[in-house]
Amino acid sequence: MINVCGKVLMNVKLMPDENFKAEDILKELNNLTDERFKIVKTSIEPVAFGISAVRTVIIIEDPKVGSSIVEEELSKIKGVGSVNVEQVTLI
């Protein structure tokens, strides 16, 4: 039996802490480099009452890395209050 694993695609929503703006997180996110995953798309999305979230699409080259490692790295970004993985799929 041959085990063929593909890449993993994640859609993630980052909510800022109360003293930070989505633009601050986006700037830090665009500067993030990690050999385990690649950020392929980022955007800012209004949520409510002047609060915005950062949406990002991430590709993990090695499915053995796992989404929890990506969540951990994203949560280390200054100003990130929460990391919500909204979709994980093989591509």
Image: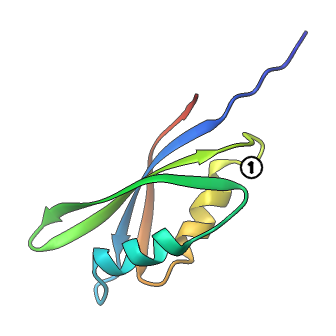
Please state if 44 lies on the left or on the right of 12 as rendered: left
* Residue in the picture at 17% in, 62% down: 46
Pick out the residue farthest to the right. 1
* Residue in the picture at 54% in, 39% down: 9
User: Which quadrant holds residue 62?
Assistant: top right
Please state if 55 lies on the left or on the right of 73 as rendered: left
Residue where numbered disc 1 is placed: 65
Q: Position of residue 5 (x, y in %)?
A: 75, 27
Which part of the image, by quadrant, shows the C terminus?
A: top right
* Residue in the picture at 69% in, 29% down: 6
Numbered disc 1: secondary structure: loop
The chosen color scheme is: rainbow
Which part of the image, by quadrant, shows the N terminus?
A: top right
Q: Residues within 10 Å of mark 1 (few under 14, many from 20)?
A: few
Q: Position of residue 35 (x, y in %)?
A: 72, 59
Q: Position of residue 61 (x, y in %)?
A: 70, 43
* Residue in the picture at 42% in, 69% down: 82
Is residue 28 placed above or below 82 in the rendered structure? below
Please state if 68 lies on the left or on the right of 1 as rendered: left
Pick out the residue farthest to the bottom. 19
Q: Amino acid at mark 1?
A: Val
Q: Position of residue 45 (x, y in %)?
A: 22, 59
Pick out the residue farthest to the top. 1
Q: How many marks?
A: 1
Is residue 14 placed above or below 88 in the rendered structure? below
Is residue 22 placed above or below 66 in the rendered structure? below
Please state if 12 lies on the left or on the right of 45 as rendered: right
